[in-house]
Amino acid sequence: MKVLLIVLGLAALAAIGVLYAASGDPSSTPSSTTSSAAATTPQPQVSSGAASCDAQPDTVTMAGCFTRLRAELEGKLEAVMERLEAALLNLENNPDLAETPEAGALSEIRADLANAEEAWQRYRDTVCHAAVLYAIGGTFRNVVGPRCDVIVLEERIRVLEESFGL
């Protein structure tokens, strides 16, 4: 359990670095005259959906955009999980696999996926909470939570689709 918490903590720190990394210029640093590091940190490269939210004229509109995009991505993640379950059911119902080692692995695959989903939710909650804490005091703080959720959801969807050929 301690190892898992350490790994989650390191992942949270790494994701904060991704969220606030300089956009290609390693020499750029936040100005020492501002009260919030998050307010002056360049934004990383993001998806076109996230970029369209970043382009909004103010933080209230940005937060609303990210909240809507997060809801869309949650729906997409649910659809990906349904496609994955359908693929597993197809394998389960394939008579050619009934007596093969693959058939016995289906319950292990499902258990691994359930464990991975639980760990991913903890990761998402932890890293996005840390990112929000990092932004406290800046005007961007109300955008950071939904923005982080979007970035992590996009990554989760990509990993599942690419790993399982969905």
Image: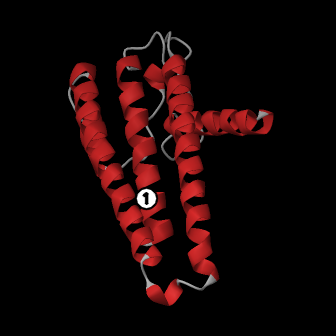
Q: Name the quadrant containing residue 94.
A: bottom left
Quadrant where the image shows the N terminus: top right
Q: Position of residue 96 (x, y in %)?
A: 48, 90
Q: Is residue 46 left or right of residue 120?
A: left
Q: Amino acid at mark 1?
A: Arg
Image color mode: secondary structure
Q: Name the residue located 41 percent from the left edge and 45 percent from the top edge.
A: 153
Task: State the residue in front, 41 or 164.
Answer: 164
From this view, report whether residue 157 is shown above or below residue 26: below
Q: Name the residue located 43 percent from the left edge and 72 percent from the top edge.
A: 165
Q: Name the residue located 54 percent from the left edge and 59 percent from the top edge.
A: 110
Task: State the residue in front, 155 or 3.
Answer: 3
Q: Position of residue 119 (x, y in %)?
A: 59, 42
Residue carrying label 1? 158
Q: Secondary structure at mark 1?
A: helix
Task: State the residue in front, 162 or 133.
Answer: 162
Q: Position of residue 74 (x, y in %)?
A: 32, 43
Decide if residue 28 is in sight here.
Answer: no
Q: What count of labels does the image hold?
A: 1
Q: Position of residue 45 (x, y in %)?
A: 42, 47
From this view, report whether residue 152 is shown above or below residue 30: below
Decide if residue 141 is in sight here.
Answer: yes
Q: Name the residue located 31 percent from the left edge and 46 percent from the top edge.
A: 73
Q: Tell me if mark 1 has few (under 14), some (14-19) or many (20+) residues whose alpha carbon lies within 10 angstroms of its own.
A: some
Task: State the residue in front, 4 or 39.
Answer: 4
Quadrant where the image shows the C terminus: bottom left
Which residue is outermost to the right?
Answer: 2
